[in-house]
Image (spheres, rainbow, N blue to C red):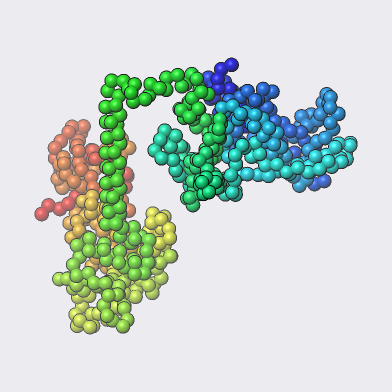
Amino acid sequence: MTKPQILTLNLTVKANKILKEKGFNIYEGSLGKLIDTKNQKYQHKYCLLNHDFPPNIHEFDIVIIDLSNEDTTEYRKDENTRVNNKSGNNTYLLCEYPQTVFDPRGLSSHILMKEIKEIIHNEAMIIVFQNENAEIEYEIVEEHGDRHKSKGIEIHSIYEFMPYFPFTKNKYGKTTEVILKQSEIANFLNKYNEDFVYENIFYHPTIWKDEEQIPHPSFHPIIKNASDEIISYIYIGEKYGLYTFPILKDNSNFIVEFLENIAPTIHPTLFPNSSQKKWTNSKEYSLPNHQKLLAEKEAIRKEYELKTKKKETEILDNNKKYSFLHEILTETGDELVFSVINFLKWLGFQNVIDMDEKAETIKEEDIQIENDKGLLVIEVKGIGGTSKDTECSQISKIKYRRAKQRGSFDVFGLYIVNHQRHLPAKNRENPPLTKEQKQDAVNDERGLLTTWQLFNLYYNIQKGIITKEEARDSFYEYGLIAFKPKNITPLGKIDEIFLKGEVFILKLNGIEIKTGDNIFIEKNNEFRKLTILEIKLDDKVVDKINKGEVGIKGNIKVSKKSTVWIKNLP
């Protein structure tokens, strides 16, 4: 008989199939499938155990049990009726409404317990994929037509077969950590760690030694949860090994890899074919260059870890440096004001004053900026919805009050809002202002601005669409401020595109363009920068041109109805 002989109980069809394909000698057994009785009110069903154990179960070397596989079959009376009854036993297991599912695994586990005790007298492995520790009540009845006579109740756990089971409680979770030191089995478990789910918590048993209680030396915790509780362990008995693993949605590859690569190193006598050449892996039998290559591999790993750690530090520093870009879209109150101030300083504004830091009894505006243009007073709000008329116009009162105090009209008012701040910025109403609110701002000579505009302004400056200086000048405009390049002239609109927007047609009327020029593509008040790669007139490539209908190929794709702009010559 080919060793090891493997008994699988309740493994999936896929797992059994892969084990066979890999050449393992397996018997596909079962603790039993759950039975859906579909009991309705006043109904009951008589059920029988449907486990499948080989008659020579004591000869098997490895038992693999998947308690997480709860395959269910529909109730069939012919499968739950005693036929050719030599013993005269007429007892059944009663499944009575409101119970609608019969789970045979608890009582089957009780029967398996006796067989496992015999198996582990020899060297053996018991591998268990966990599930919630359920205790199942079985009522044994004797059938009498439509009636039955109760013969008593038994309660059994699906874990009764376990030779060692330091169970604490049921507890569900997904966050797990392999606690073994660096080793082949630790690397193996870490490979699957993100997919583990656990249902049980175990305690670390102890023994008495030299009048002192110490952790049981045969018990080895291998995986814990976020609360440092044991959720998976290995128990190495005198001759056997018990391996309990968390739940995996698909454990087929895990089982194969464990049997091929891990189990033979722990129980080599169970895997004579796998272990024949294991000794060649020892250092003293290394092949030429092998140790050198291993050292180089380790050096690469350490270098990778150092570079990764350095990059993680850089990422954290970068997040801290530019956190104001996220905060202008998420915060409210003082935190929002502080992040807007950081943005304004990045933009190059000097003399930015946080009015909250000034010793005044009543704070009106949030921010002041004094420069050659005059005084810019800014009110900043973070709100859950969109702005009311009174919120938009409040800055006007502050503006005129400051102008009166200065005895000068060189005061500008600006309202900045982080609207609908609980929504992702792209999903917000942009701009969040009515036609009347925008016109009132023009009439009152004050500005309106959203933090979403500021966020996009940062990247438009980085792309070279607008300069910081041009952006700063825009803060003194009236109405809804639009950040767009200054000193630009329209070349025309795009009505035709080809190659999915890589090429477009433009009618020129006297303004010269040439290959390599940077022009601007604008649609819905959003600007993008395009570099001209090629110009054609009448299917001939030209370097420059100022008149006619030309084809232009750029470095970005464009869409119809976009407006093309060019920077004015100095």
Q: State the image quarter where residue 100 is shown.
A: top right
Relative to the observer, which residue lies in front, 110 or 25? 110
Query: Which quarter of the figure has residue 362?
Result: bottom left
How far from the left and from the top, in percent, is residue 115? 67, 30
Count numbered badges in the picture.
0
The answer to whether residue 357 is visible is yes
* Side of 105 where 570 appears, left or right: left
Give the quadrant of the C terminus. Answer: bottom left
Relative placement, left or right, of 252 versus 439 is right
The residue at the point 34 percent across, 58 percent down is 326
Q: x, y (%) of residue 161?
A: 65, 36
Task: Find residue 334 and report its image quarter.
Answer: bottom left
Q: Residue at x 49, y 46 (%)?
A: 224
Q: Nearer the viewer, residue 374 or 354?
A: 354
Instruction: Report whether residue 433 is seen.
Output: no
Q: Nearer the viewer, residue 346 or 538?
A: 346
What residue is at 49 percent from the left and 52 percent from the top? 227
Q: Is residue 510 above or below residue 262?
A: below
Q: Is residue 81 above or below residue 480?
A: above
The residue depicted at 19 percent of the width and 83 percent of the height is: 407
Q: Is residue 174 above or below residue 87?
A: below
Q: On the picture, is 243 further left or further right than 402?
A: right
Q: Nearer the viewer, residue 96 or 554?
A: 96
Q: Position of residue 318 (x, y in %)?
A: 27, 53
